[in-house]
């Protein structure tokens, strides 16, 4: 059975978003079930090399009664599997595409909240990421969350309860992009930032004063 590429899955996912129904969900599910080889490669290069995750796998979440529930990426600790929700991944991509216009509004700038503005501004930069890499980015974001790497590497001295959700989301995404850069470099031999003209540097946004 031929495996599905991300571009094919994306096409089916966009068709579902345009017209959610049992029929479009069934078509998407059929494509997702043909992606085990594709996801095995992702698991091998992006997940299992990390300490504590050697026994995990990656799978696409299928629909339930024609609906795709859950976040873009969630970890089922009992089954040891990262579940990718294609519909939420595509919605994240759409949000990033609209982010440049969003941050020109008071709401997009967080009505004065630096944390919200910084997160939206970062998502505006993430719109440059090729769609086939977006779900890998969100997979790494989930890895960052369950391993709490942000607390260990970025905020060692700050209690968890003092980090706002927007700050945690931002730091996890920054870490996720760095991991994605490493995988991209190892597999393709190219520099991801250069290839997509990614100009964001965390140090420039580390504090509200900048």
Image (spheres, grey):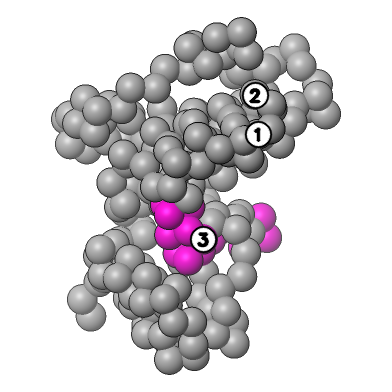
Side (left or right) of 47 relative to 165:
left
Task: Measure how far apart labels 3 and 1 are at the Cα level.
Answer: 22 Å
Q: Quadrant of residue 168?
A: top right
Identify the residue at the far front of this view: 105
Q: Secondary structure at mark 3?
A: helix
Q: Secondary structure at mark 2?
A: helix
Give the mark toward the camera: 3 or 1. 1
Q: Is residue 69 above or below residue 163?
A: below
The residue carrying pointer 1 sits among few (fewer than 14), some (14 to 19) or many (20 or more) residues within 10 Å by Cα, namely some
Side (left or right) of 54 relative to 166:
left
Q: Which mark is residue 69?
A: none
Identify the residue at the far left of this view: 189
The residue positioned 43% from the left and 59% from the top of the image is 90
The residue positioned 42% from the left and 38% from the top of the image is 100
Q: Are marks 2 and 1 in contact (CB under 8 Å)?
A: yes
Q: Are marks 3 and 1 in contact (CB under 8 Å)?
A: no
Residue range of the region highlighted in magenta in the rendering: 77-94
Quick check: can you spot residue 80?
no
* Residue linked to disc 1: 110
């Amino acid at each position: 059975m031929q495996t599905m590429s991300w571009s094919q899955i994306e096409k089916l996912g966009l068709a579902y978003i345009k017209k959610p129904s049992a029929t479009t969900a069934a078509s998407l599910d059929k494509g997702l079930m043909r992606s085990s080889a594709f996801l095995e490669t992702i698991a091998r290069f992006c997940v299992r090399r990390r300490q504590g995750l050697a026994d995990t796998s990656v799978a696409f979440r299928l629909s339930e009664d024609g609906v795709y529930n859950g976040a873009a990426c969630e970890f089922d600790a009992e089954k040891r599997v990262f579940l990718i929700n294609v519909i939420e991944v595509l919605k994240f991509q759409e949000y990033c595409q609209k982010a440049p216009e969003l941050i020109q509004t008071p709401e997009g700038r967080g009505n004065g909240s630096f944390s919200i503005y910084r997160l939206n501004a970062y998502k505006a930069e993430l719109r440059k990421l090729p769609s086939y890499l977006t779900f890998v980015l969100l997979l790494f974001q989930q890895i960052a969350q369950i391993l709490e790497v942000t607390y260990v590497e970025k905020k060692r001295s700050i209690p968890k309860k003092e980090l706002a959700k927007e700050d945690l989301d931002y730091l996890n995404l920054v870490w996720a992009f760095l991991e994605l850069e490493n995988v991209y470099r190892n597999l393709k031999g190219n520099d991801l930032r250069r290839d997509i003209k990614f100009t964001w540097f965390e140090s420039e946004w580390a504090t509200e004063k900048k």
